[in-house]
Structures are given as structure tokens and as C-alpha cells.
Amino acid sequence: MLMCKDLAGIASDYIDGELSTGQNLSVKFHLMMCGDCRTFIGNLRMSTKLMQAHSGSVPNEEFIREIDRRVHEALEQKKSRTTDSD
Ligand SMILES: [Zn+2]
């Protein structure tokens, strides 16, 4: 019998669909009886979806440009700091 603390440990695997069929059934059975874990899984699933949606909606190019900008900024700061000390 799956306990709440067991479920918490495998919840993200359950959401990702990485559990074995037996484990998957145990989770589903537990969720049928346990409102707390339904809420817990619901929240976790929501935040997982949000993260996935977010990372999916940001184009790689933009991400690379952002890194480029930060590296550039860091270099500029380094440069100005070097000129100060020189
Ligand atoms: Zn529970």
C-alpha cells in the first residue's frame, strides 16, 4: 500500500510518466482515496507544465542572444575595472 510520503518521492516520475505500470497503478489508486495527494500532484503537474510551456515558448536564438548580452556586459565591466586599476 502506497503512503503519502512514498507518493511524494515518486510524484515527479509519475507526472513524467516514468513509473512502471505497477507503480503507476498504485499512485492512481492512492490518488482516488487521498485528496491531499490529489492537490499535491495537481500543483506539481501545474508547475511542471508551466516550466515546460515557458522553456518551449522561448526561442533558442533569443536565449543565446541573452547569454551573449550578459557575457558582453561582464566583459565590459571587467574592461572598465581593469582600466581603473591600471
Ligand atoms: Zn496521500
Image (cartoon, rainbow, N blue to C red):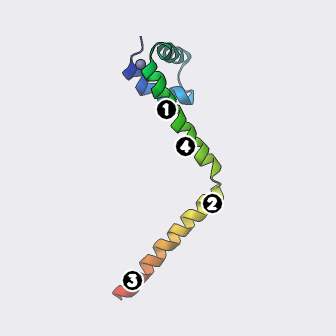
Q: How many marks?
A: 4
Residue 6, percent from left and from top: 39, 21
**Residue at which label 3 appears:** 82
User: Do the numbered discs 4 and 2 sit on residues whose CB atoms are within 8 Å?
Assistant: no
Mark found first going from the N terminus, 1 or 4: 1
* Residue sitting at the far bottom: 86
Mark-to-mark CA distance, 1 and 2: 29 Å
Mark 1 vs mark 3: which is more N-terminal?
1
For the residue pair 10 and 51, the one nearer the viewer reads as 51
- Judging by the rendered image, the residue that carries numbered circle 4 is 51
Q: Position of residue 67 (x, y in %)?
A: 54, 63
Label 3 vs label 4, nearer the camera: 4
**Secondary structure found at label 1:** helix
Which mark is first along the chain, 4 or 3? 4
Residue 32 picture location, percent across and down: 50, 14
Q: Nearer the viewer, residue 64 or 5?
A: 5
